[in-house]
Amino acid sequence: MSDVVEIHVNGRAVRVPASASLAAALLAAGESAFRRSVTGAPRAPLCGMGICYECRVTVNGVAHVRACLETVAPGMDVVTGG
Amino acid sequence: MAETAPRRVTADVAIVGAGPAGIAAAVRAAESGARVVVLDEAPRPGGQIWRHTTRGTLPRGARRWLERLDASGAQVLSGASVVDADGPRLLAQWRGEPLVVSAERIILATGARELFLPFPGWTLPGVVGVGGAQALLKAGMPVAGRRVVVAGSGPLLLAVAAALAGAGAHVAVVAEQAPAAAVRRFAAGLWRRPAKLWQAARYRAGVPRARHRPGVWVTRADGDTTVREVTLTDGRRTWTVPCDLLAVGYGLVPATELPRLLGCRIERGRVHVDEYQRTSEPAILCAGEPTGIAGAHAALVQGQIAACAALDRPAEATSLLAARDAWRRFAARLEATFAPRDELRTLADADTVVCRCEDVTLGRIDASWGSRAAKRYTRAGMGPCQGRICGAALQYLFDWTPDRVRVPVAPATVGTLVHAAALNTEPQDPS
């Protein structure tokens, strides 16, 4: 049950619970700025359920992925702050 | 090379949303022998209330419904977003590809979302919704040792505070904006609903009474890169509480984009339905929170009624109507008790961001405009969330009515969108 997977967050290897959503995993990894707003302010998850789009990050080169709707996968390459 | 023809699914009943209402509708319809397809955005069925990573963590009742869904023969397409709809046909994006669903009947079970009211500091990382905190917690967000303030309105506050405390968070205060007298009256009436009473007692056990403060609300949040401090008031006195996480939300509002796109009549923000959950549009039914916020028990009953009606067997739903009506009365009391107080309209100042997608501040918006003019002049509501967050807030702050729904209802790839125009012109029954 305590399966852990390794993902890469801004090039940094992070071990996170295999069942976690990407949003929860990023919070666990200490990320606070998931994205930058149009005026450059840091933003992080608000609704947690796919509505607000504040948690969007780049996953394996695909931009604007809602981290709260994504489950972590081994080797996932995540870029925040976009 | 990209596919030119979208995938197609035909069914007797297509259900949008796999929360309690959608699940109950799917189970009832599929067990009656109908071909059922369920479209849901989440990775697995359950909706927000039964969100889970493993079923073992769910209450028994929820597990039973999910098991029935598995065995029912209904086709559940998780990760599918509906982007356009025309009559009983839907265009969805599923696994990055377009999908056209043709059905005899559609049951909309699109659920609800949180009402967020802007205040200075609400865009800081670490400020999340109350339902948002619950969703993130269930998804694995660590909270052990973190100082948390839970604020806003509604029964969800205590439930989430108890869940956070159970996961090791230090819940500093639960600030319920509704007046203490209203909350007491509501709690006293819960004996009519034993299930709810049991739930309430369980939640309260997780939060010391002294930390539950009715008649108290958040006026601002402060911090640098993340929230550090929350300012609370009871209308006379103002004080600050240090925290690492602020969970704040003002109850739920029906998600009505898809019903509105389909032309269903909306009354006071809710989808109008007859006693068999039929909307004003032929072949379109609606169940659960979009018809009025009443919770999972109500949604389960409504979903079953909708399924019976969708299969043209409304008589089979007769035994469920009394329960549904009782839940409607409960919903009315819920709404009256936890209605946001007027003071919440004045929390945001001119520099407070209202539309988070486009960083539109309150000072740039004129109260006389209305939703459509605000979009045109400031882009408020034009970002990826398409006004789902700021729209309800602006409606509340300025008594605006929502703008008409635009396609796509959910952001979609160009590959999916090219099929949107065709949805209206294609023959009704593609073979």
Image (cartoon, coloured by chain):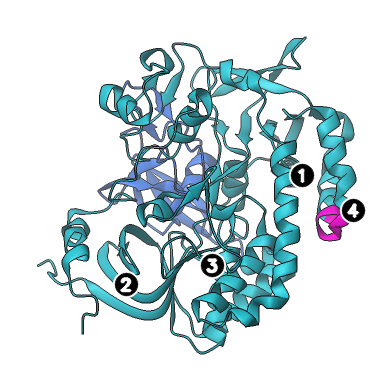
Chain colours: A blue, B cyan
Label placed on residue B426:
none
In the picture, the quarter occupied by the C terminus of chain A is: top left
Chain identifier of the residue bearing label 1 in the image: B
Marks 1 & 2 on one chain: yes
Measured in 3D between alpha carbons, the distance from the residue under mark 3 to the one under mark 4, in whole angstroms, is 28 Å
Residues tagged 1 and 2 counted as in contact (Cβ below 8 A): no
Measured in 3D between alpha carbons, the distance from the residue under mark 1 to the one under mark 4, in whole angstroms, is 21 Å
> Front-most of A81 and B221?
B221
- For the view shown, which residue lies furthest in the left direction? B1
A43 to B3, vertically: above or below: above
- Residue B402: image location, x then y, percent: 41, 37
Counting residues from the N terminus, which is met first, the one under dot 3 or under dot 2?
3
Label placed on residue B101:
2
Please identify the quarter of the rendering in which residue B36 is found.
bottom left
Residue B94 horizontal side relative to residue B367, left or right: left
The type of residue carrying mark 3 is: Gly
- Which is more foreground, mark 1 or mark 3? 3
Measured in 3D between alpha carbons, the distance from the residue under mark 1 to the one under mark 3, in whole angstroms, is 27 Å
Q: What's the magenta region?
A: B191-198
Q: Is residue B141 visible in this depiction of the protein?
A: no
Please identify the quarter of the rendering in which residue B95 is found.
bottom left
The type of residue carrying mark 4 is: Trp
At a point 16% along the width and 66% down the height, the residue shown is B425
Counting residues from the N terminus, which is met first, the one under dot 1 or under dot 3?
3
